[in-house]
Image (tube, helix red, strand yellow):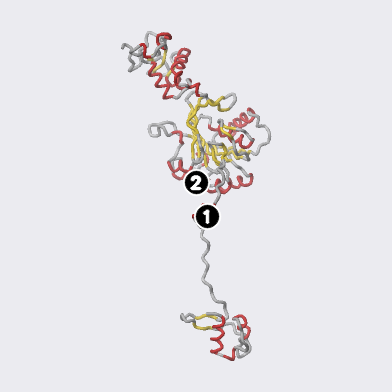
Amino acid sequence: MSDAEMIRLLRETDPSAVASQPATMDELSRQIVLGDGRVATSIAIVEPEGAKRNLLEPPRLAPVPPPSKFPGLAHEEALRLELPPIKHLVRGAAQQGSVGTLTGLPESFKSFLAMEIALKVAGGGANVLGLDVETHGPVGYWWQDDSRENELGRLKQYALQHGYTDGLPLLWHLNEDLRLPDHLEDLRAEVERERQVLVVLDSLYNFLPARIGLKDEEVAQVLDRVKSHICDPTGCAVAFVDHAPWPSESNRGNQMRGYGSVFKAAAIRWGIYLQRKRGSEEVFIEARGNNVVGFKKSLFTFDEQALEFRAVAQEEIAEADLEQRIIDYVRTHPGASQTEIEAQVKGRATRIREALNRLSKVPRDADARPGLWDAVELAPILVLGPGTATDGKYYFLRDQAGSDSVPASGTDRDG
């Protein structure tokens, strides 16, 4: 009902109550007086719907619904939006503003690689593993995987070796008992205060409270909260150093992914995976993830004097030279075990085993492998002991083997 309709209804009900010709209800409220001179504060009428309303109060408008927490994005608006370029921490391996991992078995030099990335991001370094470092800025390194003395010793050793002796925008947190998700807001506060572009957490399981198991889906939930509470709002990358489980029948081929379920794997957006050849300085490294090019498993050596990874040129591990490299190694290391040879000879372990199998068999046709047997005449054979295991198999060249040596099981030496 409009103001004019209300005034007309009131005049018809009691003409003496309205002295002039008010145009609005506000004017009407100042003209209506009661018999004793008091100003009226309420005039009740009955609306057509039967509800009573005070004419002197403004009409009640329908409540406006609050804005949606999830407004969505119209299709045409989505098409009009410009996409910003994808930012990388390390080109081809680590994306900015996301959760990543450096995963490998113990003693695969994961922490040294994490330190290298952290120091080069903070100190303006050019590349890691041959890949360009594209983002530089403040870094927070949280380390809870060893004693404080050992952690401090490693970081000092690496920094001094590579000349990082000046002040850097890098905060080291050594065994300060950070727990996730309990201290997530404290972690975010430092990221925002220091404007950090990278946070390293070494190692994952030492930041989880006892109530969370490594294989639980709760681990994935923690990683997801790190993404939503730190990476998304701040643009900071968070890298977890993560231990892979030792190889077993149940995880064969997948141990490089680290502990946990597919839920955890889904929460990780990029990863650098390390697999060290046992007893060797050689490490196979690969990188993969969403929105990163990555690279296939490649062979590196970790120089413990220089404290850095060095790529092994492909020609150094050419399959054509593999058998000769095995022969050369056994010549200088008679009685070497298969494990030792796999560790010390450059090449993939599966290829080395295949080559050892071939070299332990004399070919039926002497021309099948010209030169190797006739000219060198150093046909390797497997013998049983003596060695570190009573039933172990150890490799000798044919002219090195003692009288107690026997051909390897399954070899064909008599044609």
Report which residue position mark 2 lands on.
Answer: 224
Tell me, for residue 169, which label it has, or none.
none
Q: Is residue 256 left or right of residue 412?
A: right
In this view of the protein, which residue sits in the foreground, 206 or 133?
133
In this view of the protein, which residue sits in the foreground, 171 or 319?
319
> Can you name the residue that lies furthest to the right here?
166
Report which residue position mark 1 lands on.
Answer: 77
Percent position of residue 78, x then y:
51, 53
Q: Is residue 169 left or right of residue 289?
A: right
Q: Quadrant of residue 36?
A: bottom right
Mark 1: secondary structure? helix
Which residue is at 49% across, 39% downward? 289
Which residue is at 60% across, 45% downward? 191
> Can you name the residue that lies furthest to the left here?
415
- Amino acid type at circle 1 is Glu
Percent position of residue 403, x then y:
37, 8
**Alpha carbon separation for disc pair 2 and 1:** 28 Å
Q: Quadrant of residue 336?
A: top left
Mark 2: secondary structure? helix
In the image, residue 57 sits, relative to residue 290, either above or below, namely below
Sequence-wise first label, 2 or 1? 1
Crowd around label 1: few <14 · some 14–19 · many ≥20 (10 Å): few
- Amino acid type at circle 2 is Asp
In the image, residue 393 sits, relative to residue 82, either above or below, namely above
Numbered disc in front, either 2 or 1 = 1
Image quadrant holding the C terminus, namely top left
Percent position of residue 168, x then y:
66, 37
**From where the camera sits, is residue 387 visible?**
yes
Percent position of residue 144, x then y:
55, 37
**From where the camera sits, is residue 183 visible?**
no
Crowd around label 2: few <14 · some 14–19 · many ≥20 (10 Å): some
